[in-house]
Amino acid sequence: MSRGVADHPYDDDHAVLDDDFLNDEVEPDEPSYNTSDRAPLTGNIQSSSSSAPLNQNYLTSRIPGEDRRAPQNTIDESVWETVSRDLLAVWEKMKQVLYPKYLLGGMLQRQGSGIGDEESQGFGRDLRGLIGRWPDADGILQGGLSEGLRDWDLWGPLIFCLLLSVFLSMRASKDQSDLVFSGVFSLVWIGEAVVTLQIKLLGGNISFMQSVSIIGYTLFPLTIAALLSALGLPMIARVPVYIVLVSWSLAAGVSILGGSGVVKNRVALSVYPLFVFYLGLGCLCFIS
Amino acid sequence: MDLTVAGSLLMYLFGVLFIRNFVLVFILTLLLLSLDFYYLKNIAGRRLVGLRWWNEVNTATGNSHWVFESATDGSRVDNKTDKRFFWLSMYTVPALWVALAIFAIVRLQNLIWLVTIVIALVLTITNTVAFSRCDKFSQASSYAGSAFLGGGLARGLASNMVGRLFK
């Protein structure tokens, strides 16, 4: 408990600091995005100061001794409180996917002013030509995972994986639809595992399940693509739409996984399998 | 709890008879299984026996660790029936799925059913292992607490001991 109290003001200070940086760096012509992305942040601060016991409990649990006695207030909460908190956590993660930070806000360029050796700048310049506002390697490395992503759950991956498989199997011929379903289903899970493994092997500071959870949530744009395929979008229209959707997935995936702390020169290496994964699923949507 | 458990088991066993679509049965079974997992982990465990567990990730290092929480002694009145029912289902449901797994292997069924069973086993056994660990700590520390009549020292001692046991 004492540790929770000690940590508490630090957290607030840190958040305030972040806020100041944001105000300095974010362009003034995007106020709507700005507020929408900061809403969860301020919400967190308020809720942490208003419901202090819950927050303390949350912080003390980082102590390595894992077993402990529960503070009464959280173990006796009502069913509705539990469910609504978890639903909010899911929505928090969805929001991270809906507004990929890198493409829309450029939030992470806040530290890109003086830092950055020759190498990372070269990396940034090369890729910037490819996709609009690609961040520096430094930006990726120092981004840090956002709060909402810290506790993972598998609801998003489960739902999106099921939806993707169902939509893709709808268009398949009668005798093949079972095969398509199970193929897509296992492809998604295996793909998530492989991409995560790659990030871990490249020195990413992210836990396995957390990464699987995040990648699962970023399947949302591809689910839209699969839905469009199931509805029978004409081939010509698919090309631009699906390219946009795949790059949306990639942007969300990169910006969320950004803080995973992959070793500096290997950022492109760790993003590449993610790209292949999304592209593969996009192609599946395209041909189905 | 019983509703979703029974639901997922029944859906697995008899779903194909009524719904002539493997994929639909698979999806429904999977959804019932995950609902059951969620319900046991976050609601039933807490309300019936006062135990809860979860996984937490340290964002700085990327290490995740498991947290096992139990209610303080005497703070709640346990209903004996609830408790017995909870633990009974905790251990019988994985056993039933194991039996189904043996069945499925012997009969060399479609791969999709083996996948379902593997998912079911992972979910139910995770719950069982985690809750039994919670319960062990709860009992050990309530014993220590009653012996030394409270105080942080006894509790810390107990948690250290148990922590070492499980390392």
Image (tube, coloured by chain):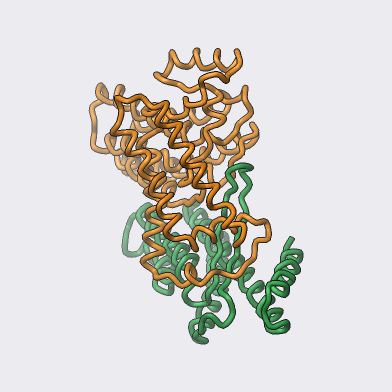
Query: Residue A253 appears at what percent x and percent y?
Result: 46, 34
Relative to A249, is A2 above or below? below
User: Number of callouts in the render?
Assistant: 0
Depth order, front residue of A156/B145: B145
Relative to A144, is A44 above or below? below
Chain A rendering hue: orange
Chain B rendering hue: green
Query: Residue B154 appears at what percent x and percent y?
Result: 72, 75
Judge from the rendering whether residue B116 lies leftward or rightward of residue A270; answer left or right. Answer: left
Query: Split into 4 quadrants, where in the image is the C terminus of chain B?
Result: bottom right
Relative to B157, is A256 above or below? above
Judge from the rendering whether residue A91 lies leftward or rightward of residue A18; answer left or right. Answer: left
**Can residue A97 be seen here?**
yes
Depth order, front residue of B83/A147: A147
Would you identify the image quadrant in which residue A207 lies? top right
**Outermost residue, bottom direction?**
B80
Query: Residue B6 appears at what percent x and percent y?
Result: 42, 72
Depth order, front residue of A275/A37: A37
